[in-house]
Amino acid sequence: MFSGHYSYDASNSTTETFIFNVVDYFNMAESLGFERLSLSERTSPSEIEVKNLTQPASVKFIADSNLMIIMRGVPGTGKSTIVNYLMESLSTDCLCSADNFFIRNGKYVFDKTQIKQAHTFCQQKAEKFCTEGHSVVIIDNTNVMRWETDFYVDLAYKHGYVVVMITPLAQDTASPRTLAQRNKHNVSADIIKVGYLLLLRKYFQAFQSIQPSYFAWFLSKRSAMKLMDIRDQGIRKVETERYNGVYLDTPVLDSVVPRNTILHVTSKYLGQSKNANQLLQQLSTHIGSIGAIKVTSVVVTKRTIAARVCLDKASQEYYFNDMEGFSGNKPAVPRGLKEGFAAHITLGVANGIEPKEARSDTIQSHFCELQAAPLKDGPVHYYPDEELAIINLDKPTAFQCIFAAAYR
């Protein structure tokens, strides 16, 4: 950590004011050993994410889905190089960048008095692409502060897009002189120093890091529609059996998940986990990879509708949601249940019920099968004491999913 005061005089159109209680920025960066941080000595998370996203299976999946990539980083850190590679690999030209607002006749002409208009231009362009439903939308701005990403994250989730944030890291990014040499717009070292000092300050104060709410496998829109059809068929089976008046009340039927909702299987909710940083590093290496799930049945209660899911062996290695909320450090999986027994996809909730309750109902459905016989055999297993039904599919239905973080 370092102690210092930094200010930027935006009202002055010709000068930037730097006030630091250190002798020199370059000495400060060197004394902090920023170029030798462990993050820059290994393969950066951004490189792993980009590699995962551009694997053939991922490219094929993304073409049939909706993905928003949000770049983060100060000028000169390699964002444009990554963006160009992703645009080519993912076959997209849906790029939103405030920088493009300043391009006139093929030349970059920056005017700081137009920054607000530039970002409005970028936001409007992103909204247009998402409304039109393009498969991939890329946001290429500095996004140094969290609030700068909020508009795009909200926009993505409004239109059913999975979000991937990419922050390039490189060994030589501690020097503003180096950044100036690498920056595509030839921005001066002094101008870059403004953003970079702010970014450096945020890194070391841990104020700027954006921690996901949870990690999950996300279905494509087409797969989500198919799963919704499975849910609706299951509900009709329940109605045929005349159980709906007993436990399936009207609020559940009226509170089905909207069609643009991103259906997912939660891998891990980070929350206030003591080992959140360790989990964050571990799970981030899988972002952009493709996993396989199988839906075996649909669970219906007064509160929720959920699909029970079987994960493939590879995905089980980074699934941590089985015993979440149970007492003890890491309780053993209850006898008779397999790893991943809590895996589910929320398909509907009653009014006033949190979606997370679908997990509790899914777990309860397994205990029902272990501890009691259903009222009837057949496609619908009904447990009157628990007011719970399990609608078994004729055969498991397989879906591919992309692994990513969620920020809401």
Image: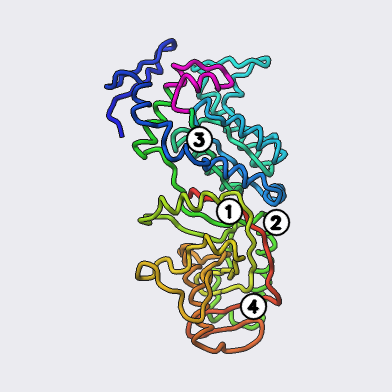
Residue 364 position in % (x across, y down): 48, 77
Q: Reading the chain from its start, which is encountered first: label 1 or label 2? A: 2
Q: Amino acid at mark 1?
A: Phe
Contact? badges 2 and 4 (CB < 8 Å): no
Binning the other alpha carbons within 10 Å of mark 2 as few (below 14), some (14 to 19) or many (20 upward) gives few
Q: Amino acid at mark 2?
A: Arg
Tag 4–tag 3 contact (CB < 8 Å) = no
**Residue drawn 59% across and 40% down?**
69
C-alpha gap between disc 1 and disc 3? 21 Å
Instruction: Name the residue located 61 percent from the left edge and 30 percent from the top edge.
Output: 81
Look at the numbered discs 1 and 3 and tell me whether their residues touch, using CB distance below 8 Å.
Answer: no
Question: Helix or strand or loop: what does disc 3 sit on?
Answer: loop
- 180 in the magenta segment: yes
Q: What's the magenta region?
A: 173-193
**Residue topped by disc 3:** 169
Q: Is residue 68 left or right of residue 92?
A: left
Quarter-wise, where is residue 328 in the image? bottom left
The numbered mark, 1 or 3, whose residue comes first in the sequence reads 3
Q: Nearer the viewer, residue 90 or 177?
A: 177
Residue 76 lies, with reference to residue 53, above or below; the image says above
In the image, is residue 85 above or below residue 182?
below
Quadrant of the snapshot with the N terminus: top left
Q: In x, y percent, where is residue 325?
A: 39, 67
- Mark 4 or 3: in front is 3
Contact flag, marks 1 and 2 (Cβ < 8 Å): no
The residue that label 2 is drawn on is: 222
Which SS class for mark 1?
strand
> Residue 272 versus residue 111: which sits nearer the camera?
272
